Amino acid sequence: MKALVNIPHTLDSGQIFRYEATQNGFRIHHGRDSFTVSPDFKIEGISQSKASSFFRLDDNYNKILQSIDKDQTIHGALQKYHGLRLLRQDPWECTISFLCSSATNIPRIKRDLNNIAKTFGQEKNGFHLFPKIGEIDNLEKLKECGTGFRAKYIYEANNTVTKPFFNKLKRLNYGDAKEKLMELPGIGPKVADCILLFSLDHLSAFPIDTWMEKALTENYNKRKKTYSHLSNFARDYFGEYAGYAQQFLYHWKRNI
DNA sequence: GTCCAGGGGTATC
DNA sequence: GATACCCATGGA
């Protein structure tokens, strides 16, 4: 498969957490799959069509980048990290991932998700699959995974969401889908935007964390205001693919 | 010891 | 609608 994907930039941009470097490339664990990808984008362990969907090769990458290339700041990030892609994740694993993410850091999110897979997920070929909906069914064990006060939210989501629920969110417009997600305990505006952007094809979503707040205040002359003020500005400014701009700016700001 | 990390719930105004 | 404080935890 010939495709423009920079694997390290894509994996290290804080959208996915269960992967590790191998002797030649990376091994990615996601949902019910575990597969390897080499620097020249050779994939082993999943079908080409599945890989194409996961890496969003169906997006018109160049056209999208052109549409968000609005100023010198984003332009620099687009050039420096060319090949960074949004991924199309499994909504269930993505939801649990970002429930784990609140008020913590990426190394810890990785640790907790690996613990969850190890504790609740089925083992296959020496790797742990991510548990299915309904399988994260022990609150005490969930706390032992290191999730702290987030455990009750994960536990509740495990008892609440369904595959049809996520499929419905893909069909709803951005605002309605976000509203539905935020009915779940532990999911506020930021976590909802991450789930929408990384797993539900809502590419206009623009999550604001501390790094994006820094980017907007330091590089876009914005004042610290409310979440929706900053996010709505960026969605309006960058347009229907604002989520791609967010991902480039996030990765850029963290690596300056 | 203090601050920070891909935040959200709740009380209070 | 906004602000203050709490929730757990590990690393810098």
Image: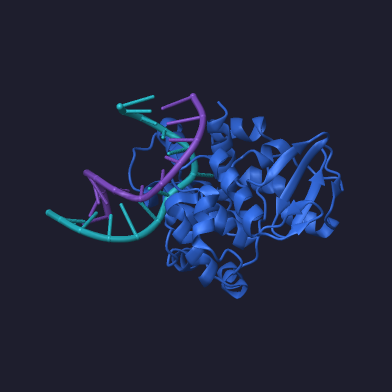
Chain colours: A blue, B cyan, C purple
Residue A135 horizontal/vertical position (percent): 61, 66
Lateral position of residue A211 relative to residue A43, left or right: left
In this rendering, the answer to whether A215 lies above or below A52 is above
What is the total number of numbered labels drawn onto the structure image? 0
In the image, taking residue A32 as reference, residue A229 lies left or right, namely left
The percent position of residue A89, horizontal first and vertical second, equals 66, 56
Q: Which of A235 and A132 is in front in this view?
A: A132
Give coordinates of residue A157: x percent, y percent: 51, 65
Q: Which residue lies furthest to the bottom in this view?
A: A164
Residue drawn at x 86%, y 44% as measured from the top left = A42
Query: What quarter of the picture does the C terminus of chain A occupy?
Result: top right
* Quadrant of res A59: bottom right
Image: A139 above or below A105: below
Evaluate whether residue A18 shows in this view: yes
Please tell me which residue lies in front, A190 or A111: A111
The residue that appears at 76% across and 57% down in the rendered structure is: A33
**Could you tell me if residue A239 is visible in this image?**
no
Q: Which of A117 and A187 is in front in this view?
A: A117
In this picture, residue A220 sits left or right of residue A256: left
A233 to A141, vertically: above or below: above
x, y percent for residue A202 = 57, 59
Q: Residue at x 65, y 48 (%)?
A: A86
What residue do we see at 59% from left, 44% from top? Answer: A111
Residue A71 location, quadrant:
top right
